Image (spheres, grey):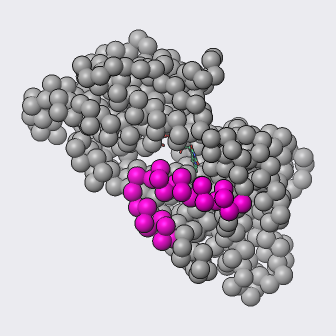
Amino acid sequence: VATSQDQEKSRKEHRVVIVGAGFAGFHAARELSRLAGATAEIVVINSTDYFLYLPLMPQVAGGLVEPRHICASLPHRLRSTRFVLGTVRYVDPRQKVVSWAGPEGASGQVPYDRLILTAGSVNKLLPIPGIAQYAHGFRSIAEAIYLRDQITRQLELAAVAADADERQARCTFVVVGAGYTGTEVAAQGQLLTTRLARKMPGLAGQQIRWMLLDTAPRLLPELAPPLSRTADRVLRRRGVQVRTGQSVAEALDGYVQLSTGEKVATRSLIWCVGVRAVPLVSGLDLDTNRGRLVVDEFMAVPGAPGIYACGDCAAVPDLTRPGQICGMTAQHAQRQGKQVARNVAASLGTGRARPYKHHDEGFVVDLGGLAAAANPLNVPLSGPPANAVTRGYHLVAMSGNRMRVLADWTLNAITPPEATSFGVISAESVPLDPDNPRA
Ligand SMILES: Cc1cc2nc3c(=O)[nH]c(=O)nc-3n(C[C@H](O)[C@H](O)[C@H](O)COP(=O)(O)OP(=O)(O)OC[C@H]3O[C@@H](n4cnc5c(N)ncnc54)[C@H](O)[C@@H]3O)c2cc1C
C-alpha cells in the first residue's frame, strides 16, 4: 500500500484523506475530486464498501425495499479517488497520519496533508437496566435485516404457539424513541405485521400490538408540530399505541417494565432513542461538544492544522440559530460534505472558503402505504401529496439504485410481502452495545 500510495502522491501535490463515506464523506469526496482532483490525491477510507442511504432503512425493516437497494457501491461511485476498505483506529494529528485496519487482518497507515473526518454516529445507549441485553438498535443495515427477520419469525412462532400469553408476547413490538427513526419503524413495522398476519390462519383474531414510547410530550419532537400531529393521527388510526411522556424503566427476559410501572410482555424491543458521535472522535484528544468534535463555521478543527470534520461526528455551528449546533441529519451532513470539500480545496489554492450556513428546507417522514408527513419549504402536507413528495425526495437524494427502489415500491403496492426470515443475522451479531455483547 505504502509503495503505490507514495507513487501516486509523488504525481500529485497533496493528499487529502477522508474518513467515512456516508452522507458527508461521500459528497465531500465527489466535490473534492471535481475541484482539486488534478492536484490532490483523494483517499477515502470506509468500514464498508457501500454508502448506506439510512433514511430508507425503516422501509427495509418493513419489507418494502430490499437491503442492497439502499447501498451504493463506493469503489464504483468514487472511481476518481483511492478507496480503502478499512476502519480507522487512530489519527495522529502531530505526525499527520491515519492508521486503519482492514476486514481480513490487513492494516496500514496513510499520511495526509488534509484530513476530513466524516465517520458519523452509532446507537446511543442510556443507563437503563437490561437495555444492552434485550434491546436492538437501528443504525446499520444488519440491524434492519435482523428486525425484518425478527418480526416475521415472531409472527410465525406466535401462529403455532399453544399458549395464549406466549402468542400475545410474540405479537407485541415495543419501539422506544419517537424521533423520525422510531416513528417510521413503528409505522412500517405495523403495516408489515398486518400484511403478514393476513396470510397466517393461526393468527386469525389475534391482536398485534405495536407500542411507540417517548419521554417527550409529542411524536417527532425535533420536527415541526404539524408533522407530529399527522404522524400521531396516522399511527393511532392504525392501532399503534402511542405513549408520550413514558419510556422503558427496565428490560427483562420476556418483558419490559415501563416508567409508569406497567409490565409489557414482548420478545421485540427496538431501540431508536438516537445516536452519538462515533467513539473514534472521543479518542482524539481534541475538544468535543456533546460528544461531537468541535469545529468552526468553516468546519476546521481548532488547534489541529489540516483537520476538518462534519456530519454527525462534528458539532458544526448552526449560523441560522446562533449559539446552537446543527442537528444530526442527512440534509446537513450532505451539504456540509460539499462545503467542506470547497473549503479544503480553497486551502489547497482552488476557490474561496465559506462558512457553512443552511436554512432548514423541511423534512419528510414516510408512514407507509399512502401516508406520510412532510413540510417541504415549510408547507405542511399529509396523505398522498406528502407521500409523493417524500418518495420523490428520496429518489432524488439517493446516490444510485433509484430504479431498483422504484421497482420495490411498485411491486410491494401490488403484491403481498413474502413471510421469509433468513436468520443469517443472529441477535448476538447485532448487539446494541458492542462493549457488552449479550444480546
Ligand atoms: C434509521 C435512520 C433514518 C434516518 N432518516 C433520516 C431522514 O429521513 N432524514 C435525515 O435528514 N436524516 C435521517 N437520518 C440521519 C442521517 O442518516 C444522518 O444524520 C447522516 O447519515 C449523517 O451523515 P454522516 O456522513 O455524518 O454519517 P454516516 O452517513 O453514518 O456515514 C458515516 C460513514 O463512516 C463510516 N465509518 C464509521 N466509522 C468509521 C471508521 N472508524 N473508519 C472508517 N469509516 C468509518 C461508516 O461506515 C459510514 O459509511 C436517519 C438516521 C437513521 C439511523
Dominant secondary structure, magenta: helix
Tell me where residue 321 sits by quadrant: top right
Q: Residue furthest right?
A: 261
Up/down of 206 relative to 265, above or below: below
Towards the viewer: 342 or 212: 342
Up/down of 251 relative to 324, above or below: below
Q: Is residue 399 magenta?
A: yes
> For the N terminus, which image quadrant?
top left
Residue drawn 67% across the image and 67% down it = 369
Give the percent coordinates (x, y) of residue 147: 60, 62
Q: Residue furthest top?
A: 303
Tell me where residue 433 sits by quadrant: top right
Towards the viewer: 34 or 182: 34
Give the percent coordinates (x, y) of residue 313: 50, 32
Towards the viewer: 6 or 164: 6
The magenta span reads 383-408
Q: Is residue 397 left or right of residue 134?
A: left
Give the percent coordinates (x, y) of residue 180: 66, 48
Residue drawn 77% across the image and 45% down it = 226
Q: Is residue 148 left or right of residue 380?
A: left
Q: Is residue 155 left or right of residue 85?
A: right
Q: Is residue 72 left or right of residue 75?
A: right
Up/down of 412 relative to 12, above or below: below
